[in-house]
Every structure is written in structure tokens, then in C-alpha cells.
């Protein structure tokens, strides 16, 4: 059974009611609850006292607002640009990188002026092939049954010659996307990990079995399909666990060419501080003395596995993916 996001609080900006999606969400929650609250411009502050309480309250809140316009954010190495349909995720993956930049605003934020967002995407893809990422700061599939934003974007990109769309998800409510005429212009990727990591650090998201089954449905619907394996952790039986995960994936997919993105675990000191406040009993390996320090593309430093461990990861996954998925491509390993 798919995990459906059911917010405990809904905040709708008054200006959002001027758009079809804003009206749709207003009417839905008027009848289904919780009773939506209107706000003018500034999102009402969360009155919980502790960082942890504020975080968990935010995770249960849906904000319906407008994309403010301006420039899209870059999205390397996944794509050229972020497509800002949604931000936030209802899942509770303790390692999530969003703890760094969304810890103080973890609510799900839906932008209802989708036509304006897509018009901006159109203007950015007039002269050369351009890829847009729909899940850079979110998991939009988690609320697709409420919004239909992904379906609208998929249909748009199917008719936009030089543009392509891609997004990644841990959620599995993809039935409404299967019959769309996507023309192969949208790649749907699934974020997966081995059972040891899912059991230890992932909450509020579908289990691996359901993610693999959903990926098979998407592949059989003709979509390009990819897999984000990450974060990759080193632990005593990591080779056996990740090999089992890849074998299960092979069993769920039709023959075909798939893409893989491999991301080793890394963390910032800011993220570690947020994680310790939000999940005080977490068992994540966050000891700096066991890692190497590396500057990231946005100017701040992060702690990554030593080079020797990273090389072991890369060699292992390149060998196993070539074995189980010989027609597939590894886009990057970081």
C-alpha cells in the first residue's frame, strides 16, 4: 500500500486562491480536513519551543504558496536547473541532506502558479538541450495525488523539443503517471538503499520492496528509469547487503538500459548539529575523525569517506552494475 501524506495543518496563501491548483486544494481540505488557514504573505511562525518539536510540526504541515519568480537554481550534477514545483518531504530519513538547508522550514511547500514555472522552463530551453530536476529539494511524488503537478509537468515536457525532465522519489504512488503520453522526455528515478540502511535510518517512506515494484511499473510504461543509490555507507556487511539489493532490483525490472547515480554518505557540521537535535538517538556514523574534509560546490565543507573507502565503493558498484545491468550507465559517483 502506498504511503499517502495527510497533513495535520494546511496553510494557504490568499493569492494562491487565484490559481486552479490553489482553489482545488482549498476545496479539498475544506471538505476532507484539516480546515485550511489563510495567510497573506508571510508564512505563520511555528510556535513550538524546541527545535525537534518545530521540525516534527513542520513535517506535518502543508503550505500552499506561489513561486516568487526570478532565476531557477542550478542543479549539478543531476541537471541544468531545478524546477521549483514543490519543496520539502514528509519522510523521516535521518541522514537527509535537507536537514542542512530546510531544517528550519521542513514543511511541504506547494507552488500553485505552475504555468509560470513551466513558462520559465520553456524560456531556458530554447537554444540547446536542457534538463530540469523536479526533486532537488523535495519528493514531489509524496503529494502528487493532491497536486497533479508532476503530471502537468510531464505533459508539458513531452511537447517541449529541447527540454527534458527528471525527478527522484522514495514514494510509490505513481499510478496516475503511468498512462501519460510522456514521449520518453521524463526520466523517473527511484532512491534506493540496502535493507540495513533502510531499517536503521529511514522512516515514513515505503519499504524497498514497494519502491522496486513501482520502478518496474514505470519501466513497463515506457519511461526512462534511473536509480539513485545513496547514501552509500560502509559497515561490516555492506558488500553483501548492496549485492542483495541489486539482485532484487534486477528481478523487478524488464530488460533495458537504466541510469545509476551513486552517492556516498557525507555530512556537514551544520547537518550533524541539526540531526542531533531532531533525532537525538540516531546511530548515524558522524565522527569527523573517521572522514576526510572536502569543500563542496557551494563553498562550505563536508566530511566524506577517505579515498580508499570511496575507491572500494566505486569499484564494487561498477562491477556489480555491469554484471546485473550490462546495458545501463553510471552517470556519476560522488
Image: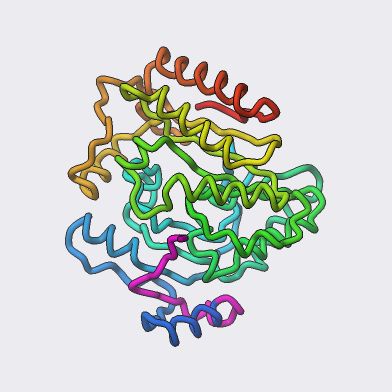
Frontmost residue, 85 versus 139: 139
- Residue 303 appears in which quarter of the rendering? top left
For image coordinates 51% across by 60% down, the residue present is 86
Residue 313's spot in the image, x, y percent?
46, 20
Q: From the viewer's perspective, is residue 10 above or below residue 55?
A: below
How was the colour assigned to the protein in this rendering? rainbow
Whether residue 53 is visible: yes
For image coordinates 27% across by 31% down, the residue present is 286
Residue 318's spot in the image, x, y percent?
57, 21
Residue 291's spot in the image, x, y percent?
32, 21
Tell me if 270 is positioned left or right of 12 in this view.
left
Tell me if 190 is positioned left or right of 119 in this view.
left
Frontmost residue, 241 versus 158: 241
Image: magenta residue range: 1-21
Residue 23's spot in the image, x, y percent?
55, 82
For image coordinates 58% across by 28% down, the residue present is 332
Tell me if 84 is positioned left or right of 106 in this view.
right
- Membership of 210 in magenta stretch: no
Number of dots carrying numbers: 0
Q: From the viewer's perspective, is residue 270 above or below residue 287?
A: below
Direction front: furthest residue:
251
Frontmost residue, 83 versus 204: 204
Direction top: furthest residue:
308
Whether residue 37 is visible: no
Frontmost residue, 219 versus 131: 219
For image coordinates 52% across by 16% down, the residue present is 315
Amino acid at each position: 500500500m502506498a504511503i499517502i501524506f495527510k497533513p495535520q495543518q494546511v496553510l494557504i496563501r490568499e493569492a494562491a486562491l487565484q490559481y486552479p491548483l490553489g482553489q482545488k486544494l482549498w476545496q479539498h481540505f475544506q471538505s476532507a480536513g484539516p480546515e485550511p488557514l489563510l495567510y497573506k504573505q508571510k508564512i505563520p511562525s511555528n510556535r513550538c519551543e524546541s527545535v525537534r518539536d518545530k521540525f516534527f510540526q513542520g513535517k506535518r504541515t502543508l503550505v500552499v504558496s506561489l513561486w516568487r519568480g526570478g532565476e531557477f537554481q542550478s542543479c549539478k550534477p543531476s541537471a541544468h536547473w531545478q524546477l521549483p514545483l514543490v519543496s520539502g518531504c514528509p519522510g523521516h530519513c535521518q541522514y537527509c541532506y535537507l536537514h542542512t538547508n530546510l531544517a528550519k522550514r521542513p514543511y511541504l511547500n506547494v507552488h500553485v502558479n505552475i504555468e509560470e514555472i513551466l513558462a520559465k522552463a520553456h524560456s531556458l530551453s530554447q537554444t540547446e538541450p536542457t534538463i530540469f530536476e523536479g526533486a532537488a529539494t523535495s519528493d514531489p511524488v509524496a503529494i502528487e495525488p493532491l497536486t497533479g503537478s508532476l503530471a502537468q509537468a510531464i505533459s508539458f515536457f513531452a511537447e517541449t523539443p529541447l527540454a527534458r525532465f527528471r525527478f527522484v522519489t522514495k514514494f510509490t504512488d505513481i499510478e496516475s503517471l503511468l498512462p501519460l503520453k510522456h514521449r520518453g522526455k521524463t526520466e523517473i528515478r527511484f532512491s534506493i538503499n540496502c535493507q540495513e540502511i533502510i531499517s536503521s535510518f529511514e522512516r515514513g517512506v515505503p519499504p524497498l520492496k514497494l519502491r522496486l515494484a513501482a520502478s518496474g511499473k514505470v519501466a513497463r510504461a515506457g519511461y526512462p528509469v534511473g536509480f539513485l543509490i545513496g547514501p552509500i555507507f560502509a559497515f561490516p556487511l555492506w558488500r553483501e547487503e548492496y549485492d542483495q539489493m541489486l539482485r532484487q532490483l534486477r528481478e523487478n525490472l524488464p530488460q533495458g538500459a537504466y541510469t545509476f547515480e551513486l552517492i556516498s554518505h557525507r555530512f556537514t557540521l551544520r547537518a550533524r548539529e541539526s540531526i542531533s537535535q531532531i533525532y537525538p538517538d540516531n546511530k548515524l556514523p558522524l565522527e569527523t575523525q573517521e572522514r576526510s574534509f572536502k569543500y563542496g560546490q557551494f563553498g562550505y565543507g563536508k566530511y566524506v569517506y577517505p579515498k580508499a573507502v570511496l575507491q572500494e565503493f566505486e569499484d564494487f558498484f561498477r562491477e556489480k552494475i555491469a554484471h546485473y545491468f550490462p546495458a545501463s550507465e553510471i552517470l556519476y559517483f560522488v
